[in-house]
Image (cartoon, rainbow, N blue to C red):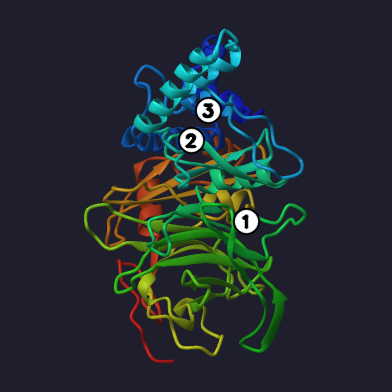
């Protein structure tokens, strides 16, 4: 199946006239392709969030007649030159805005030579204008970032959609694709030290590195405030000792109850197990690590938006029984305030540490008979839920390059499975495999109900069929 490129999908989501004649063909493809459908949803979600931010900020011109950020951002960017290879900031074009600026501009374009009186008069007008009118300084406070794949740079903007500064990086296209496919963040903007000015927290790799071996925090002026290495760590799991250099994946930033400052969370990987989630304060002090045997590349901060507690949600795989048994897909729900000290996941015991008190739920997902027939290794789940939803939506997709499968598990806030949905292509794949005699099931409501009933909950010692929180047993 030939997929639709990201630029065309973006034009489709924004209703661009460039794809007006292709919309039916694009929609037909999206009906069949979960991957492109997911990417289109991610692009749509991005512009919805951007539009909300734009409406929340005062604008110099109405943007109601255009799609979110398209015209304002293009106008702002057009005033800048492309990235200077020396790394210097582009300079905004000088446009007269105030009375004094217009007077000075007029004098420069129309030199006065008729006499001293005219010069004095104009000078007086300039002084008067300077005393009565002040040019508003450009807001230097970062508001959001954008991964510009054409300029190969992370761009930092203020709330007026003006470019403040850039971090050139050749990894931008790959990182941007990773962010959109898993709906995660490598860079966030937040006032982490509560001083009224936002910082930029990023796990973006260095320009000459493939992996990010350090988490970096820049202040609003692009000054590097903190560089925290992931580290070369040694850890024992059961009878084996693991020593390797770790690199950071995604980043989460939020306030934690009982703390004056913000907390920073970042997933740390080494290409295989074991894996950990790091908890830092804004000054780089390590507050805790949540150790897990099995990678958890999906890291999310879930905010129900109704006054309910925020949760860290990790999605990935449990590899504790490999190579004797296949890994399986899991989701861990954690209380961020309790990610303290070096603690291990209750479902992957063997690090010799205490069980993490942060664990609230630990959920295992079944493998469908179609995946087994196609011999597909389990792909990592990812979170679909957006802020304000009173449900947690987890997507499980898989593909062999020709046949694409997708299921969505919808949980209540107490992690009870409410519903299982399927992707449009699942019926076709199922019919093909059944015709080949590789499966015998019937694809109907009962099929989805069986998947729903096959979800399991780890209670700290055993797997349970009913929704059960983690009980923190002694070793």
Report if the CB atoms under discs 3 and 1 are less than 8 Å apart.
Answer: no
Q: CA distance from mark 3 to mark 2?
A: 47 Å
Report if the CB atoms under discs 1 and 2 are less than 8 Å apart.
Answer: no
| Viewer-proximal residue among 258 and 372 | 258
Tell me: 299 left or right of 257: right
Q: CA distance from mark 3 to mark 1?
A: 46 Å
Q: Would you name the residue on which mark 2 appears? A: 427
Question: Residue 250's x, y, as percent?
Answer: 55, 58
Query: Under tag 1, what secondary structure?
Result: loop
Q: Is residue 131 above or below residue 417?
A: above
Query: Under tag 3, what secondary structure?
Result: helix
Kindly indicate the quadrant of the structure image that contains residue 79: top right
Label 2, residues with CA under 10 Å away: few <14, some 14-19, many ≥20: some
Kindly indicate the quadrant of the structure image that contains residue 310: bottom left
Note whether residue 22 is visible: no
Q: How many marks?
A: 3
Question: Residue 39's x, y, as percent?
Answer: 53, 36
Query: Which residue corresponds to the image point at 56% horizontal and 47% vertical from the top-left?
Result: 179
Query: Which residue corresponds to the image point at 63% horizontal and 54% vertical from the top-left?
Result: 204
- Which of the two marks, 1 or 2, is nearer to us in this view? 1
Q: Would you name the residue on which mark 1 appears? A: 377
Note whether residue 388 is visible: yes
Q: Is residue 263 above or below residue 130?
A: below
Question: Residue 309's x, y, as percent?
Answer: 27, 63
**Which residue lies most toward the front here?**
116
- Which of the two marks, 3 or 2, is nearer to us in this view? 3
Q: Would you name the residue on which mark 3 appears? A: 76
| Viewer-proximal residue among 50 and 5 | 50
């Amino acid at each position: 199946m030939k997929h639709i490129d990201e630029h065309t999908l973006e034009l489709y989501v924004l209703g661009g006239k460039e794809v007006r004649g292709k919309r039916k063909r694009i929609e037909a493809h999206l009906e069949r392709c979960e991957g492109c459908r997911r990417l289109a949803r991610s692009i749509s979600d991005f512009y919805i969030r951007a539009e909300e931010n734009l409406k929340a900020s005062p604008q110099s011109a109405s943007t109601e007649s255009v799609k979110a950020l398209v015209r304002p951002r293009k106008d702002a960017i057009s005033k800048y030159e492309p990235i200077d290879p020396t790394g210097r900031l582009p300079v905004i074009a000088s446009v007269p805005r105030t009375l004094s600026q217009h007077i000075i501009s007029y004098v420069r374009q129309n030199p006065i030579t008729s006499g001293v009186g005219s010069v004095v008069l104009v000078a007086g007008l300039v002084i008067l204008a300077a005393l009565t009118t002040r040019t508003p300084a450009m807001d230097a406070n970062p508001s959001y970032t954008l991964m510009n794949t054409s300029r190969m740079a992370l761009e930092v903007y203020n709330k007026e959609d003006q470019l403040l500064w850039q971090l050139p990086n050749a990894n931008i296209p790959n990182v941007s694709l990773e962010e959109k496919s898993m709906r995660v963040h490598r860079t966030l903007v937040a006032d982490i030290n509560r001083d009224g000015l936002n910082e930029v927290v990023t796990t973006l790799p260095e320009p000459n590195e493939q992996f990010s071996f350090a988490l970096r925090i820049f202040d609003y002026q692009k000054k590097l405030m903190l560089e925290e290495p992931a580290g070369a760590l040694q850890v024992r799991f059961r009878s084996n000792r693991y020593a390797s250099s770790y690199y950071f994946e995604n980043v989460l930033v939020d306030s934690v109850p009982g703390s004056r400052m913000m907390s920073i969370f970042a997933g740390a990987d080494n290409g295989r197990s074991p894996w950990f989630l790091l908890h830092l304060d804004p000054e780089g002090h390590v507050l805790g690590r949540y150790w897990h045997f099995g990678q958890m590349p999906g890291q999310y901060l879930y905010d129900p938006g109704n006054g309910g507690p925020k949760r860290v949600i990790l999605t990935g795989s449990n590899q504790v029984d490999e190579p004797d048994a296949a890994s399986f897909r899991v989701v861990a729900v954690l209380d961020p305030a309790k990610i303290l000290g070096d603690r291990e996941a209750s479902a992957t015991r063997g690090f010799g540490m205490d069980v993490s008190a942060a664990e609230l739920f630990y959920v295992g997902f079944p493998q469908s008979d179609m995946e087994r027939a196609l011999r597909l290794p389990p792909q990592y789940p990812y979170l679909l839920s957006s802020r304000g939803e009173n449900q947690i939506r987890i997507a499980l997709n898989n593909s062999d390059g020709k046949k694409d499968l997708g299921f969505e598990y919808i949980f209540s806030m107490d992690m009870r499975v409410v519903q299982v949905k399927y992707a449009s292509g699942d019926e076709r794949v199922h019919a093909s495999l059944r015709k080949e005699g590789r499966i015998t099931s019937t694809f109907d409501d009962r099929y989805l109900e069986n998947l729903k009933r096959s979800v399991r909950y780890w209670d700290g010692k055993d797997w349970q069929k009913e929704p059960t929180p983690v009980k923190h047993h002694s070793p």
